[in-house]
Image: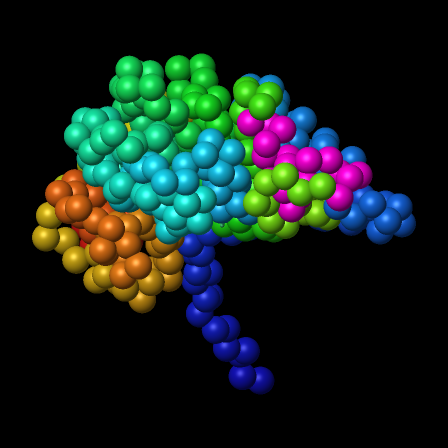
Amino acid sequence: MEAEKTAPEAVRPVAAARIDFTAEDRAWIAERIQEVLASGQLTLGRFGADFERAFASLCGTKHAVAVNSGTSALEIILRSLGVAGGEVIVPTNTFFATAAAVVHAGGRPVLADVEPATMSLSAEDTERRLTSKTRGIVVVHIGGVISAEMPALLDLARRKGLWLVEDAAHAHGSIRSGVRAGAFGVAAAFSFYPTKVMTSAEGGMIVTNDAHLDQEARIYRDQGKASFTQNAHTRMGYNWRMSEPHAIIGLRHLQRLPAMIAERQRIAAGYDAALREFSRCRPLAVPNQDGSNYYKYVAFLSQGVDRAAVKRQMKERFQVSLAGEVYDTPLHAQPIFREMSTGGLPVAEDVCARHVCLPVYTGMQEQDVHRVLAGLREIVG
Ligand SMILES: Cc1ncc(COP(=O)(O)O)c(C=O)c1O
């Protein structure tokens, strides 16, 4: 009898990202969704309130307001602060929503350059762009890193009488000098979009220490109603509410956040150690090594290395998908914002074009990390 031929073992592809809900998570979530379905309290209920309390405690802030996206969290903060007719400094290296929220709240985003170490807002370039119309500054913690510019930006805001808002969509649980993301400025916006370090499927959270802002945010998120029980609309609000099933999913992921961050940090430490020896790819110099939640693991390619070719070869030769950049195109180069740009944003143009994001997620296997590094070593080592 002919010996059975064994097919060569297929190489398991390494995904760019993975959304992690264990069997226990799924059971925990399902049980509580059953409970809210039976109760009929499907929105603005006890799980939303629990999620808010637990998230405020994570950030070390007095208040948290759950909403239906990171975008709405930003817009509510900006409306509550009254940006209509004013200018807001926004880094050009960020997601569309950071600047779009300013426009939707009636303000004008002024795009500023970033600093090269962490690709986050530059304090020096921010100061250069202030005018008599500037109301405040939005900082974005790119990839989960709270940059070393934070003290200078806070000082600038204080000196000029401006507020500082954190777009902390990437930075759940990140920390710098003992302060958590969300607790630096007047308020912060988080996103729970599925690719983030923790998710509620869709969702967002506003955190603040300001009791008035907390009240305003609650009014805005529920159609501008001053009270849940009265039909009196006092603000130009919207339906920005978070449903109870979303709050339940978020609450569960929040319980696992410290362990999920620790796992990401372990993977990142392995990348850091290996990349030090590479000649054409160097790790981001994270100043507060342990403080990043590693939403993204960023590495810079040397000048002249073709990023698209690196990504293609990693995929074709090593079955490794690199994650999406943060960001590949600065906002001033986006068609919708081109006209608003006042130019002079060279650092963002450089770093946006030259970085890659290596896969980092919970459940990533040791051999996956090795394959990422083996591929990179051959292509840009
Ligand atoms: C920096 C940044 N700001 C805002 C948002 C908007 O969050 P959401 O998708 O939850 O509306 C995101 C989400 O991708 C983001 O990355």
Residue at left offset 68%, top offset 35%? 226
Is 40 in front, or is 38? 40
Q: On screen, 157 above or below 133?
A: above
Q: Position of residue 17 (x, y in %)?
A: 46, 51
Colouring scheme applied when the structure was drawn: rainbow
Q: With 156 as the anchor, is 241 left or right in this view?
A: right
Task: Choose top left, top right, bottom left or bottom right for residue 221.
Answer: top right
Residue ranking furthest to the right: 38
Residue at left offset 63%, top offset 50%? 239
Residue ranking furthest to the bottom: 1
Q: Which residues are magenta?
A: 213-231
Is 349 in front, or is 340? 340
Q: Say which quadrant the N terminus sits in.
A: bottom right
Q: On screen, 133 above or below 183?
A: below
Is 296 in front, or is 219? 219
Is 181 in front, or is 334? 334
Residue at left offset 36%, top offset 46%? 99
Q: Position of residue 5 (x, y in %)?
A: 50, 77
Q: On screen, 322 above or below 266?
A: below
Q: With 268 as the anchor, is 242 left or right in this view?
A: right
